[in-house]
Every structure is written in C-alpha cells, then in structure tokens.
Image (tube, coloured by chain):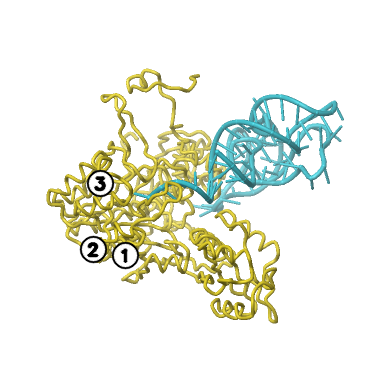
Chain colours: A yellow, B cyan
Amino acid sequence: MGTLRRTHNCNDLGLENLSQEVTLMGWVLRRRDHGGVIFIDLRDRWGITQIVFNPEINKDVHAKAHQLRNEWVVAVRGKVERRPGDMENKKLKTGCIEILVDELRILNTSETPPFPLDEDSDFSDNLRLQYRYLDLRRPEVAKNLILRHQALQTVRTYLNNREFLEIETPMLTRSTPEGARDYLVPSRVSAGKFFALPQSPQLFKQILMMSGMDRYYQIVKCFRDEDLRADRQPEFTQIDMELSFVTQEDIITIVEGMIAALFKATVNVDLNLPIKRMTYDESMLRFGTDRPDTRFGLELVDLTEILSGCGFKVFNTIIEKEGAVKAINAKGCANFSRKDLDDLTEYAGRFGARGMAWIKIKDDEWQSPITKFFSDEEITAMGKALDAQPGDLILFGADKISTVHQVLGELRLELARRLDIIEQDTYDFLWITDFPMFEYDDDAKRFSAVHHPFTAPFDDQLDMLESDPGAVKSQAYDLVLNGNEIGGGSIRIHNPAVQEKVFKALGIDDEEAQEKFGFLLKALTYGAPPHGGIAFGVDRLIMLLSGSTSIREVIAFPKTQKATCLLTEAPAPVNRKQLTELHLRPDWKED
RNA sequence: GGGAUCGUAGUUCAGUUUGGUUAGAACGCCGGCCUGUCACGCCGGAGGUCGCGAGUUCGAGUCUCGUCGAUCCCGCCA
C-alpha cells in the first residue's frame, strides 16, 4: 500500500464529499473499458463505488488501469466528483458520485474466478464451498454473516444488561448416555479413554448455577454426530442460558424480551408480546406435531370415536387395536386429480402411511372408493366434525396414533405449500408447554426423556414418577417460529431425590447414575438452587431471519451433507504415529 | 442403512426420450476497436477425459452395471 491509507469504505461517499481527495481500497468487481475512459466498480464489504480513469486527466494511470481484471485488489487515490448530467446510478448508494483517479496501486492480482461474483446467480454448492472465500465476497452471502453478527451482539447486549455472565465451558468433556451420538476425542495421556465434544453445555451450566453464578449465558458450539439435513449441521451454535431462583414464567418473560430486541435490531420487526402459548397435548391433537406452523389452518380432526365400529374394515381394525383415525379437510380441493392424490399418497408414505383414504365432497355426493362402507349417521357426523362443504377434499390418516400424527402433520404442511396459503414475511411465534416427561421407546422397551433427564416434573406430579411415568408432565417449553423449533428449555431438577427417581424411571440404575452423572448428583447435595434455562439454535434462527432455506447459508464454513469440509478437505487421514500416540490401532487399509 | 434428483467448455445449461457426420448456446476468458458506461458495445479467437470405471454394440454424452461427488428426504437428531 506504500504510503496510501484508506480514508473511506466503498459505501461511504456521497454528494457531501464532493471535491474531497479520498483513498479507497477494494476488489475490482468489473471493469468497463471504453478504450478512452475506463470505469471500475470497486467493491468491499460495505458496498460499491465507481472509479473513473480518464486519459486526459492522467495518462499513465489510465494506461495502468488497462491491465486491471476482475478480483484484482487495488488502492486508488483521487477526487470525489459528481456524476455528469443524468448519469446517476440509482441502484448504488454511492451512485451520485464517482472517484476520478490520480493514483492507482495494484495491491494484488487474481486468477479468473471459477464463478461470477457480480450476479445473484446459483452455482453448485460443491463449487461454492470449495471456493468459500470467493463465495463470501458476494454481498448476498456476506449479508447473512453480517446479520448473524448483529443478532448475536444484540443478544449479548441484552443479557449483559440483565446481570448475565458469559462463561465458557469445556469442549473436551465426557460422553454421556442418551441423546445423540458423540464426537469422540481419544486421550493421549490416558490410554483407552476418550473425551466427547459437548452436545450442549447442559450439565456445566447447571453446575454453574450450583456455583452461585446465578445468571449464565454462552454463545457456544455444540456437536452431534448424526446425519445432516438442510437445517442440521454436525457442529452448530446455541445461545445457551441458565438462571437461578426463577420460574418458567420468569424465563419466558426474559426470553421474549430478548427475541423482541433481536428482531427489532435485525429485521426491524416489532413483535407482539406476550407470545401465544399452547400445551403439547393440544398441539399434538390439532397439528400432529410439537412444532406446529400456525400460519394456516388445515387442522387435524379426530374421527376415531365416530368411526368406531364402522363398516370399513381397515379403519375398524386399526381402531380396535387402539390406533386412531384422523382427517384433514383440504378446503376447496375436491378438484384434485388422480395424480395429485397419488402424489400426496406417496408423500404420506415417506412418513410411514401405508395408504391414504380420501373423500371428495361433491354437490350431490361424497365421491370416494370408501364412501360405501359408511352409514348415513357416520357420514353426517364426519361432515359435521370436519365442517365439510361441497368442493372440499377429506384426507384420512389411520394407524397407530404416533404415525397418524406424523403423516397428517407432514401432509398438512405439504398441502399448505401446494395451495400456497402460507403467509410469507410473517413471524409466527408460539410457546409449546407442558411436555410429557417421558415417551415410551418401542424398540428399547423403556421410557426415554422427551427433553432431557434433568428436566423437572411439575411438583404436584412427583408421585406419578413411579406409578404412571408416561402421564407425568414436565416444566419444559419450546419456542416455535413458523413451524420450526428455534429454542427449548426447562426448569431443572434441583433435588437429588427427585433426580434419582427420574433416573430410575428411565431405567438408569443407581450404579450407572453414579458412574455417569455422579458429579452432578453430588453437586445437587451441596445446596443447589432452583434453576432453569433455555437454549436457542442460532443457525436455524438466522436462517429464518435471512429467508434462507439451508443453515449452510448462515454459516461461514459449513459442512456438506456427508459432513465434510470442501475447503479444507476435512476430515483427512492422519499418520500412523499420531494414531499410535493415541493408543489407536487402525483396522482399515492404508494407501 | 434406505429412497429420490443431479453431474456435458471456467460457469449456467441444451443435446440423453428414439445410440449414428466435426457435442452446441449464453455468460466468462484471450486479442483487436471504442471517451460516459454501470450486465457497456462491436469484431475475432481459444476453450470439452460428456464425473470416473467396466459392459452391451459395427458405433455410447445417449443403453446396462458399478463407483465417486453435490443436494433433498426417511431412519437418526435426549
């Protein structure tokens, strides 16, 4: 750069700077070489400024500018001029002015980029991730990282102003049973022993409460070695919080303020507080899921009772085996073609449906292969329950209740997308509360924790932990945004006796509890305060804020679906010496 | 572990249904011309292991099998 020092960025200058001498530095976005005058769009993180080289002003500099190519890095010193006549570019914030250059320094050259950086076009993720540094130069990608920064700084400020301490917890910790698969790190010093990367700082933040820290937060990486999705990466970021001497209401109030501040600061949206709430049971009943998208209707209607003993054998057999029959009224969809219905049936099949019954409500009849099996009373009762009008389409789910819920819950979303009835640009928040403590795992033949094993049951249901664990509700709560779970938390158990009961209900015996969680159980006996907390999925939240369809768009260096990094080519082989030091003996073939 | 889509020039794609001459277009790149453009314009040029490997065939970008990679989904994700 020599003696040149940057005076402004590429989004700074306007008419108020006319005839000032300025120095800008940045990348050549594109050049327009007229043989005589040459225009350069100079780009940096902030914006674009037009640079002009005029041979009549400075012949040498103009000659040098002929060499410039896309993505070369330059410094220019020159004068801010108003653009002549009607040459303003309304698309640029700096479009009223341009820089007439006296001095040009080429700070670096560049290979021709493998994809264009000046257009809002799509290229394969393969290429984007391999050249992520180029991809991130594109403003529409960079803006997501800027948004993410703004969001996190707002959260920090909000929590800092409310007596929270940001405290780091270990990345090298111990593997715990239940939950996702752990990423393991072999110990060099302790042969045959392994650290695990944290799935969340859950136990540490509870112990910080027992340490009297009172209010903790951390914006922290978490790791889960499970398969990826558009909204799931193996390493992801949480806003993790924990508070002492609080109730569920206290936490919800603080969090609502935080989310409101975040939305105001990032997308300038004022949220209506308080956020509405729904119990888990109601959500499952009406939407078949614990994270309902409530921007549209198409709710599930339970027909099990009406159709109990009906003439349709498929339904009846399911009902006799304590399954359920539910349906969705797809308003105005009676004109769906055979193919539409086949597509929906196939879609339902992905989620375990073994078929999908339907009825088209016509003016004079209920048109369907199964209508004939139902009595007039059953048809009248169904029509009433579903509010069926001519022109409607009824879609049925019949199976065990969990399958019905999943199938119809997904079918409901798919229908809404097809009908394009989801209101865009709205932020529909919902708290789901009163989760069950446990759910029965059919494969393992035992109960597992719906939230996690440290979640407190309601105080008046402690007795049921032994007598009827499946019926116990917990003080857990999830925050749902447009059908996405963006955060979840609970009041924790602070009484060692209750914690032991919960372990017992989960089939974790004393010995195992001591071995795996002994440090927590011990800490609970030394004056653990009542406490609770919540954690938010930052990537998912920013994805929704930015209108992206994948969290890769809001992560600087994301992994592919095979959990690899195309930029660094991680994971990569290591040499045998490293393995030996870690007391590992490979059983795979080496190249 | 399973299902689906995709892979052709640097990039985005056409060509694959129905195998048949020298695999095309646009943008980009290189060279020339051009003093008010802003996706500058005009003229010319270079650029291809049709992801990779087998197979069928007189002949494969096109058909078959396998394999690699990207994406979406199911399972999985307390």
Residue A430, position as x, y percentages in the image: 38, 66
Amino acid type indicated by mark 1: Ala
Q: Give the percent coordinates (x, y) of residue B50.
A: 68, 34
Disc number lying in front (2 or 1): 2
Q: Is residue A128 above or below residue A533?
A: above
Residue name at image x 53 percent, y 39 percent: A127
Q: Nearer the viewer, residue A558 or A232?
A: A232
Name the image quarter holding residue A163. Answer: bottom left
Badge 2 is on which residue?
Answer: A459
Tags 1 and 3 both on a single chain: yes
Identified by mark 3, the residue type is: Leu
Q: Which residue is mark 3?
A: A203
In the image shown, does A394 or A4 lie closer to the viewer? A394
Give percent across and percent down for residue A237.
Answer: 35, 47
Q: Are marks 2 and 1 in contact (CB under 8 Å)?
A: no
Q: For this rendering, which residue is in front, B7 or A169?
A: A169
Between discs 2 and 3, the one toward the N terminus: 3
Give the Cα separation between the discs numbered 1 and 3: 28 Å
Pick whichever of labels 2 and 1 is earlier in the sequence: 1
Res A543 seen here: yes
Q: Helix, strand, or loop for circle 2? A: helix
Report the chain holding disc 2. Answer: A
Q: Which residue is mark 1?
A: A260
Left or right of A455, for residue A112 = right
Looking at the rendering, which quadrant does residue A468 occupy? bottom left
In the image, what residue type sits under mark 2? Answer: Asp
